[in-house]
Image: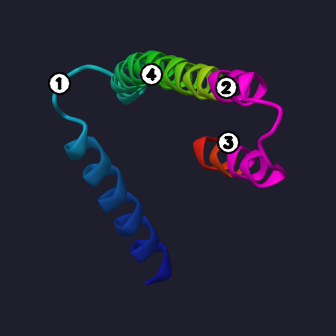
């Protein structure tokens, strides 16, 4: 009994695999798997390139934002340096608070 059950179980497994890959009759399963793998690899490579491009664009945007923030800080510092000498220390602390908010 056990010998027959094993054979039928193995045979059923084989038939099921062949049925699921019988898109091209006569083509070995390994070739179909290889084509699927190459197709998936191509799609993955394309997505990876697109992700890299998006990453570069995001990095560029971050750099631009930092550049703008640095320009604002520089302008604020220049204004605080050009302020009259009789200004109190309180106005200087206000400038530093503005700088902290801009960053």
Q: Are marks 2 and 1 in contact (CB under 8 Å)?
A: no
Mark seen at residue 25: 1
Q: Which residue is mark 2?
A: 79
- The first of marks 2 and 1 along the sequence is 1
Colour mode of the rendering: rainbow
Tell me the distance, in whole angstroms, between the alpha carbons under discs 1 and 3. Answer: 72 Å
- The first of marks 1 and 4 along the sequence is 1
- The first of marks 1 and 3 along the sequence is 1
Tell me the distance, in whole angstroms, between the alpha carbons under discs 2 and 1. Answer: 80 Å
Residue 34's image quarter? top left
Q: Tell which tag, 2 or 1, sits nearer the viewer.
A: 2
- The first of marks 2 and 3 along the sequence is 2
Mark seen at residue 99: 3
Residue 86's image quarter? top right
Q: Which residue is mark 4?
A: 41
Residue for point 16% across, 30% down: 23
- As helix, strand or loop, the secondary structure at mark 2 comes to helix
Q: Nearer the viewer, residue 66 or 15?
A: 66
Magenta residue check for 80: yes
Does residue 47 appear left or right of residue 86 in this picture?
left
The kind of secondary structure the magenta stretch mainly shows is helix
* Residue 15 at x, y percent in the picture: 27, 51
Tell me the distance, in whole angstroms, between the alpha carbons under discs 1 and 4. Answer: 24 Å
* Residue 2 at x, y percent in the picture: 48, 81
Does residue 99 appear left or right of residue 63 in this picture?
right
């Amino acid at each position: 009994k056990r010998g027959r059950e094993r054979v039928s179980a193995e045979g059923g497994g084989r038939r099921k695999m062949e049925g699921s890959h019988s898109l091209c009759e006569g083509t070995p399963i390994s070739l179909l798997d290889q084509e699927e793998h190459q197709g998936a690899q191509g799609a993955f490579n394309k997505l990876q390139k697109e992700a890299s491009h998006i990453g570069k664009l995001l990095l560029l945007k971050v750099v631009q934002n930092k550049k703008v923030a640095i320009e604002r800080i520089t302008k604020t510092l220049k204004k605080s340096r050009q302020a009259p000498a009789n200004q109190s220390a309180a106005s200087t602390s206000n400038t530093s608070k503005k700088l902290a908010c801009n960053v």
